[in-house]
Amino acid sequence: MKPSILVARAVFPEVLSQLAQHFEVTSNQDDVLWTPAQLIQQLQGKQGAFTTGSERISQAVLAACPDLKICANMAVGFNNFELDAMTAAGVLATNTPDVLTETTADFGFALMMATARRMAESEHFLRAGLWNRWRYDMFAGSEVHGSTLGILGMGRIGQAIAKRGAHGFGMKVIYHNRSRLDAPTEAACGAAYVSKSELLQQADHLILVLPYSPEAHHTIGAAELAQMKPTATLVNIARGGIVDDAALAAALNHGIIAAAGLDVFEGEPKVHPDLLTVPNVVLTPHIASATMSTRLAMAQLAANNLIGYLVHGKPLTPLNPQAVKA
Ligand code: GLV
């Protein structure tokens, strides 16, 4: 008998077809947003789950779904997983590293440029019919080429952004990370390691790319924003909650920093109301990895993790291999 799996959100039809060759598939192609209780109900009798960052796999879900053996997240981030509880319950967790690195780095760089050069703000002005003349300082933004790019979180995506800045735009690149990169990797990225305070104080553009964890909550709050240059831009493509969004909106309103580009939000898809009214922000709905080819690659990797583990006993990108007893 084929194992049973749940595909918890809408996904590419070709990926569903691939999964159907190996599994009894229950899918959610209507993309209904289930409550935790509905998710538990849908997971009954399922050995595998294809999830996205929106489905929380908590201790309560695990306790209520004893047949579950693997949750394959179609995301590189996995803060929707209670990983220790999954390991304790013997449930394997997988994510989708590598396949989205360059696409996400492109977006982080684009969001930084759009923010620094005030693209959203000036577009709104034009659409509102307010453009009636050229002016020497109209929507004058801050320089990107030759400026100092700061990166907080220097994993795969941070490194790919650093290379774009250092080698493509002649930027001085500085970074801070829990652990310093080795010298050859730093050289390849054209990036220099600095303390968090130095990063905040020296960056003209600061891009956040660190993973979310409870310890990373409000890594950037009022105190950190106060250390930044008043001309600086802040870009968050990491996770909501890494920035204190209320403090950021206040900082933007009071000229503590110049502008922000945000793809992720605390409590998304809700957005702090003050961020919706400040003019000097570029806001996007969590789309940094959203090109069709990258999203397909992510979905295929999640599917191949399910097939790899439930059919062949070998997942491709496990996060907690220790969950599986030898
Ligand atoms: C997107 O946010 C991801 O983690 O893949």
Image (tube, rainbow, N blue to C red):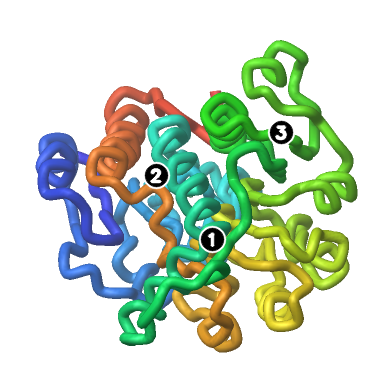
At 45% from the left edge and 30% from the top edge, which residue is drawn? 98
Which residue was labeled with disc 3? 172
Disc 2 versus disc 3: nearer the observer: 3
At 57% from the left edge and 27% from the top edge, which residue is drawn? 163
Q: Earlier in the sequence, mark 2 or mark 3?
A: 2
At 48% from the left edge and 80% from the top edge, which residue is drawn? 270
x, y percentage for residue 29?
16, 63
Q: Label 1's element? A: helix
Residue in the foreground of this view, choosing between 37 and 44? 37
Where 1 falls versus 317 (above or below)? below
* Residue 115, label in figure: 1
| Mark 2 residue's CB less than 8 Å from ligand 1 | no
Tell me if mark 3 has few (under 14), some (14-19) or many (20+) residues whose alpha carbon lies within 10 angstroms of its own: many
Amino acid type at circle 3 is Lys
Which residue was labeled with disc 2? 72
Mark 3 and mark 1 residues within 8 Å of each other at the beta carbon:
no
Task: Tell me: 93 left or right of 255.
Answer: left
At 45% from the left edge and 57% from the top edge, which residue is drawn? 53
Q: Earlier in the sequence, mark 3 or mark 1?
A: 1
Q: Which quarter of the picture shows residue 156?
A: top right
* Residue 136, label in figure: none
Tell me if mark 1 has few (under 14), some (14-19) or many (20+) residues whose alpha carbon lies within 10 angstroms of its own: many
- For the C terminus, the quadrant is top right
